[in-house]
Structure formats: structure tokens, C-alpha cells
Image (cartoon, grey):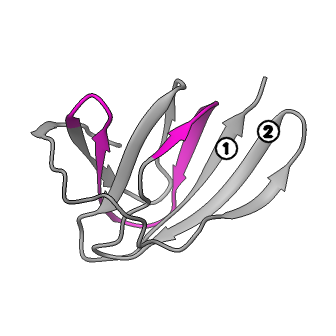
Amino acid sequence: MATATAKSFTTEFEERTAAEHVVLHEDENTRMIHYVIKPGEQTGWHTHEYDYTVIRVSRGTLTSNFADGTSADFDYEPGTTSSYKAPVEHNAVNTGNTDLIGYEIEFKK
């Protein structure tokens, strides 16, 4: 299960180095995204406009730096999920040593 721990904000993560995500499905209600973030890569700052659920496929550690200056570590375990309420503005960084693989399902309604 995902765990979050407070950490101090770091400003070194300002640019996208992770590959763009792949939209697998989109309709008027939902959007399903597949992503792979390699060790040391980051998504770059972005905002989730919709509530969403993450489905983790791999093991590893993701650090999210949030717009309010806080950050949290999330442990990835295959088959675990978490849901989040929009808006979420953050930069996600793979701070582990394995590829982070997952799916996001965004709920438009």
C-alpha cells in the first residue's frame, strides 16, 4: 500500500525528463493513461484537473513535490492503488532504482 511521508521541498526538479505518458483510452467520462518513469526521471510540473486513481504495476519509490512546497514519498507495489482529489499540482520524480510503471484513470465527471 502507498505510504506518504512529509519531506522538505527541493527546487532541483524543474524540467521533464520522463517520456510522455500514453493515453490508452479517452471518452467523455474517463481517460486512461499508461506511464513509465525511469530512475532519476521526473514528469515536470503539471496539474491534475480531474480526480484520478493510480494503479501500480512495478515496485519502486516515487517522490512528489507539491506546489505548496511539501513533498511525499510513495512506495510502489504491484497491484496497489490510490485515489486523489483534483486539483493536484506536482512534479513526480522516480527516486528509486527501478522503472516505475503504472496506469492513471482520470474521472471527468
Left or right, residue 27 beside residue 47: right
Are dots 1 and 2 in contact, CB under 8 Å? Answer: yes
Identify the residue position indicated by label 2 in the image. Answer: 30
Q: Residue at x 53, y 74 (%)?
A: 19
x, y percent for residue 5: 17, 37
Q: Calculate the distance from the C-alpha at mark 1 to the C-alpha at mark 2.
A: 7 Å
x, y percent for residue 52: 60, 35
Q: Residue at x 51, y 71 (%)?
A: 36
Q: Could you tell me what secondary structure mostly forms the magenta stretch?
A: strand
Quadrant for the C terminus in the image: top right
Q: Residue at x 23, y 64 (%)?
A: 95
Q: Residue at x 78, y 61 (%)?
A: 24
Decide: few, some or many residues near mark 1? Use Cα within 10 Å; few <14, some 14-19, many ≥20: many
Q: Amino acid at mark 1?
A: Ile
Of mark 1 and mark 2, the one earlier in the sequence is 2
Q: Quadrant of residue 65?
A: top left
The question of residue 9 being in magenta is answered with no
Q: Quadrant of residue 17?
A: bottom left
Identify the residue position indicated by label 1 in the image. Answer: 105
Residues rendered magenta in the picture: 46-70
